[in-house]
Image: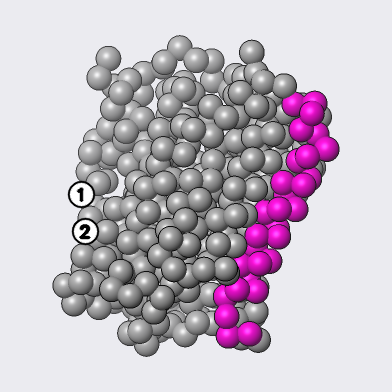
Amino acid sequence: MPGRFTAPIAAALLLAIGMGFGRFAFTGLYPLMLDDGLLSLHAGSLAASANYAGYLLGALLLARSNANRAEHLCQWALGGTLLTLAALAWISQPWLIVLTRLAAGLFSAMALVGASLWLLSAGGQARSAPLLFAGVGLGIALSAQLIALGHAGGLHSQALWLSLALGGLLLALPAWLQLRRPPRCDGAAPGASTVATGNLGAWRLILIYGLAGLGYIVTATYLPLLLQGHLGDLDPLQIWTAFGLAAMPSCFAWHAVHRRLGTARGLTLNLLLQAVGVILPVFSQATWGCLGSAVLVGATFMGTVTIAMPAAQALAGRVRFNMPATITAAYGLGQILGPLLASALFARSHSFNPALLVAAGALALGAALCRPYARSARPAT
């Protein structure tokens, strides 16, 4: 019995390290790396896009992976992520930082694919999917607090990367030990779909998911940076912590919404709320607006994944290509374009507002593409 409960926690810890630390800690450290002269705004945007490109590459390379390789994928993901975190404590050349972030993105994809295969496929614990994805929010919140504490203590950005590597190592130890024990099945049939996709077609879901990747990533990359100087004595990293904390329970909430409303209605609600969160700082950079943006986007971006991935699996039988891998690729392309677009728009306007408007527009368009099919989506039984 203990394995049935500890396995989902171990898988969530793996995503906390591979995604929360390895992928999203850069958002909290980006402004500090600018202050330390390690990156320019343009180089930082390249590093962010390189990370998402690495994630996309990793997802495509691992698209045909099976559950037999899950344990090794998880181990490689843990080791690789910790190495890239530690490496950034010593690297000062921008081009090496970009390459390291590319590698970190690949290991993040390995963590997501490996943990999903290990828990959901090999372990058959389909009901634990929301807990698995909640690990991403846990990692964001923990890494943000480590960065905030270190920054308050006067540590520079490279020392903070080292502290993240050490903190990640502590989280990795129990996860690594649990990986050697096969997770126990919870009785749910692996791959069984209980979601209603209605008439939402595969290609439309791919387009919607790509727009979602573009829509959330501007906030997820630049939020602490765009809030600098607008919060008085409040550290923007505390706002970023709220982003992660909001993401943790959201996976359970959006899983329930998806089962009740179906894919089209669930995605419509998710993307519209996300668009509101993205656009809030355009109208107010007071504490309430910043906190509202962090909570709304944090509480919805993993919800998009929680809704779209099972829907893609349900649609897989209607197409001749790997549907989960294809929507992951579309999401990845949106994430790559987001920082590049934000950097270009900032160079013209010296403001992140145009990028936020474009991002919110992408999310609103995604929601609009869901609407013609919302009436035909029925709750799962």
Q: Which residue is mark 1?
A: 170
Q: What colouring method underlies this structural image?
A: one colour
Location of residue 254 with respect to 122 vertically, above or below: below
Residue that appears at 29% across and 53% down: 142
Q: Is 358 contained in the magenta span?
A: yes
For the residues labelled 1 and 2, say whether their Cβ atoms are less than 8 Å apart.
Answer: yes
Magenta stretch containing residue 66, yes or no? no
Q: From the viewer's side, name the closer residue of 103 and 302.
A: 302
Q: Is residue 156 left or right of residue 230?
A: left
Q: Which residues are magenta?
A: 349-377
In the picture, measured across the screen, residue 279 lies left or right of residue 365, that is left
Q: Quadrant of residue 2?
A: top left
x and y percent of residue 213 in the render? 62, 55
Residue shown at the point (52%, 53%) measured from the top left: 297
Residue at image position (36%, 68%) is 236
**Element marked by disc 2:** helix
Residue at position x 40%, y 33% from top? 131
Instruction: Report the disc number at residue 166.
Output: 2
Viewer-closest of 141 and 315 = 141
- Dot 1 alpha-carbon crowd within 10 angstroms: few under 14, some 14 to 19, many 20 or more: few
> Where residue 306 appears, x then y in whole percent?
55, 37
Could one spot residue 25 in this view of the protein?
no
**Looking at numbered disc 1 in the image, what kind of residue is underneath it?**
Leu
